[in-house]
Amino acid sequence: MSRNITIRNVPNDTGDVLAARAAAGGRSLQEYLRGHLIELARRPDPEVLMASVRRRKDRTGSRLSVGSILGHRDADRK
C-alpha cells in the first residue's frame, strides 16, 4: 500500500531546481522525488549509523589510528 506525502512551504527556487532536474532526466517531479525518497529511506540515518559503529567499536575494542585509516584510504587511490 502506498502513501501520499505533502511537503509544504518549499521555497520557489528549490522547487524550480528540482523540477528542472526531473525534466532533464525525462521524469515528472513526482517520479523524480519518489525515486529520491525511496533511496533516502534505504540508507540509515547518519546518527543511527554512527551509534552502530560506536557500539561495535566498544564491543570489539578496535582501535585504528588516523594515520592507519588514511594510509588504507590512500593505498586504494594508487
Image: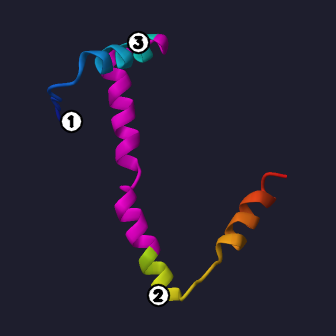
User: Which residue has dot 1 on it?
Assistant: 2
Considering only order in the chain, which callout, 3 or 1, is on the residue closer to the N terminus? 1
Q: Quadrant of residue 32?
A: top left
Residue 55, given in percent of the width and then of the height, sits at 42, 79
Relative to residue 60, is residue 6 drawn left or right? Answer: left
Span shown in magenta: 24-53
Q: Label 1 vs label 3: CA separation?
A: 26 Å
Image position of 3 (left or right of 15): left
Q: Amino acid at mark 1?
A: Ser
For disc 3, the neighbor class at 10 Å (few under 14, some 14 to 19, many from 20) is some
Q: Identify the main secondary structure in magenta.
A: helix
Query: Which residue occupies the foreground of this view, 9 or 26?
Result: 9
- Cα–Cα gap, marks 1 and 2: 39 Å
Residue that badge 2 annotates:
59
Which labelled disc corresponds to residue 20? 3
Mark 1 neighbour density, 10 Å: few (under 14) some (14–19) many (20 or more): few
